[in-house]
Image (cartoon, helix red, strand yellow):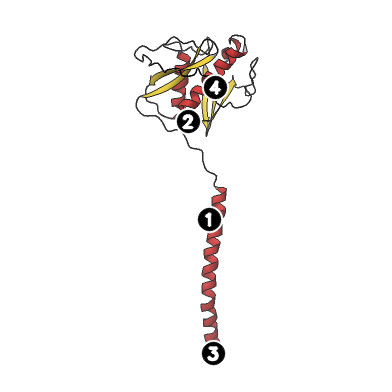
């Protein structure tokens, strides 16, 4: 057998090994790349057309209750959330009480994955009635309203004038808060809101 023939045979034997090595190399690279691609948290889809929001107000000073409110279409997730919070500031149209003090303003809203960050003005903290119950009702009316209307959001971070480690007299707002539906009045029916004549109590930012 000539040297040229032996060289040809060696090349023919080498090709299958190269193909196998290439296949295994590709599989290992794909596995590595998949391990580095962390899944992205689902984003809230913009709500098109009329939709009904659930707002949390106060009854008897110590319990949250739900009230329905029909809202107009919104363009994106942040706009949708802003609309819901604005209606919460507008106050109830039924017999319930407002959880948020006079002069409260939403300065900014942001959504990062499953976390919503809401910046409130100083009046929110300064004019809250004294007592832990009033603070609980105010804070969790916001938190529960956000999470019940936007299931992709699991926690809410409340800031005051940009301060991220703010503390009320009884509640610490330095960490994101999960909803607490145990504050809700059990077996409370949801009254239909009169959307033709909504309560307009939204305060202008000072």
Q: For the residue labelled by badge 3, is the local secondary structure a helix, a strand or a loop?
A: loop
- Alpha carbon distance from label 4 to label 2: 17 Å
> In the rendered view, does 79 fall on the left or right side of 137?
left
**N-terminal label among 4 and 1:** 1
Q: Do the residues labelled 2 and 1 touch (CB within 8 Å)?
A: no
- Alpha carbon distance from label 3 to label 2: 76 Å
Front disc: 2 or 1: 2
Residue 151, numbered label: 2
Q: Is residue 34 or residue 2 the one in the foreground?
A: 34
**Residue placed at 55% from the left, 57% from the top?**
29
Work out whether residue 59 can be spotted: yes
Residue 30, numbered label: 1
Q: Residue furthest front?
A: 187
**Residue placed at 49% from the left, 22% from the top?**
145
User: Which residue was labeled with disc 3?
Assistant: 2
**N-terminal label among 1 and 3:** 3
- Alpha carbon distance from label 4 to label 1: 46 Å
Sort mark 4 into few (<14), some (14-19) or many (20+) by Cα contacts within 10 Å: few
Q: Do the residues labelled 3 and 2 touch (CB within 8 Å)?
A: no
Q: For the residue labelled by badge 1, is the local secondary structure a helix, a strand or a loop?
A: helix
User: Which residue was labeled with disc 4?
Assistant: 182
Front disc: 3 or 2: 2
- Alpha carbon distance from label 2 to label 1: 33 Å
**N-terminal label among 4 and 2:** 2
Sort mark 2 into few (<14), some (14-19) or many (20+) by Cα contacts within 10 Å: few
């Amino acid at each position: 057998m000539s040297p040229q023939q032996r060289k040809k045979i060696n090349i023919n034997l080498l090709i299958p090994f190269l193909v196998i090595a290439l296949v295994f190399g590709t599989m290992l690279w794909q596995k590595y790349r998949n391990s580095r691609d962390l899944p992205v948290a689902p984003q809230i889809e913009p709500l098109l057309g009329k939709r009904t929001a659930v707002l949390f107000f106060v009854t008897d000073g110590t319990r949250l209750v739900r009230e329905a409110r029909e809202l107009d279409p919104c363009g994106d997730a942040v706009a949708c959330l802003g609309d819901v919070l604005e209606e919460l500031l507008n106050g109830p149209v039924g017999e319930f009480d407002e959880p948020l003090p006079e002069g409260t303003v939403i300065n900014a809203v942001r959504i990062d994955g499953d976390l919503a960050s809401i910046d409130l003005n100083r009046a929110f903290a300064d004019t809250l009635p004294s007592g832990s119950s009033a603070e609980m009702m105010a804070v969790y009316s916001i938190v529960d309203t956000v999470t019940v209307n936007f299931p992709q959001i699991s926690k809410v971070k409340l800031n005051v004038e940009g301060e991220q480690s703010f503390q009320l007299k009884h509640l610490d707002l330095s960490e994101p808060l999960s909803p607490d539906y145990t504050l809700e009045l059990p077996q409370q029916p949801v009254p239909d809101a009169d959307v033709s004549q909504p309560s307009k109590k939204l305060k202008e930012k000072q």
